[in-house]
Amino acid sequence: MDVQVEQIGGEEKRAGRPMDRSRDALVLAATVDLLSERAYEQVTLDEVARRTGRAKTTLYRRWATKDELVLAAVRSLGSPPELEDLPDHGSLRADLLAVVDSPWLGGPVARLALFAGLESAGRSSPHLRDAVRTAVTEPYVEIYRRLLFRAIERDEVAAALMASISVLAAVIPAMSDLRFAEGGRAPGRDYYVAIVDDVVLAAVRGTAG
């Protein structure tokens, strides 16, 4: 095999084989799956390598640490589809629950299991915590903000609520993060229904009253 030689600053620099990134998506998907199944501390590059048929040395050439791999996996998730296509089911409650029941990332059960793994990853590194906030928390806050604002626009919610939108929009993500931080199993749908009914909508009704 020919090896290219490049002259740089009077020194010869050998250029190795270009890194094969054709299976990056497979590796990142396997990492996401592992985060759905177990806490961050139990996710290993050995297991990622086994599931993807890649050598661990190959993974380390692409991602020098587990944190770098998980960071790339978090960024690969994209944004909740509701950020671009806001639910519109005729009422604020129905729209909020449509976000809870979204099929994104395999549906609510799979998604919440993944979020539990991401929360444990965030505890291990400020970089991962920031990435999770950017990829998950902030988009959901924006979705809820838009839903609340639209409810005011269509006179479902009193205009007096306008000053409280930024706080109410953060309630569901904040209570979700709190539950994940407690450890154990990911919360079920009933937990989010209770937040919607007993916290967000209760505040809305209180303002309307």
Image (cartoon, rainbow, N blue to C red):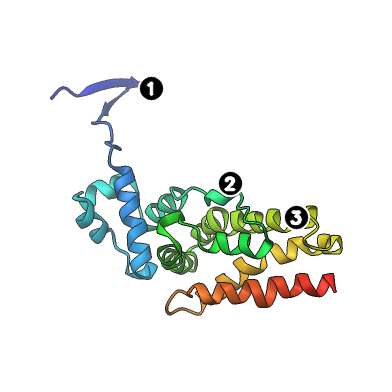
Q: Quadrant of the N terminus?
A: top left
Residue 18 position within the rendered picture, expressed as x and y whole percent measured from the top left: 27, 31
Which of disc 1 and disc 2 is earlier in sequence? 1
Residue type marked 1 = Gly
Q: Is residue 85 left or right of residue 5?
A: right
Q: Is residue 99 left or right of residue 117?
A: right
The residue lying at 18 percent from left, 50 percent from top is 53
The residue lying at 35 percent from left, 70 percent from top is 38
Of the numbered discs in the image, which one, if any, rests on residue 77? none
The residue lying at 59 percent from left, 45 percent from top is 84
Mark 3: few/some/many CA within 10 Å (<14, 14-19, 20+): many
Which quarter of the picture shows residue 15?
top left
Q: Where is 177 relative to 162, above or below?
A: below
Residue wearing tag 1: 9
Q: Nearer the viewer, residue 70 or 84?
A: 84
Residue 171 position within the rendered picture, expressed as x and y whole percent measured from the top left: 66, 69
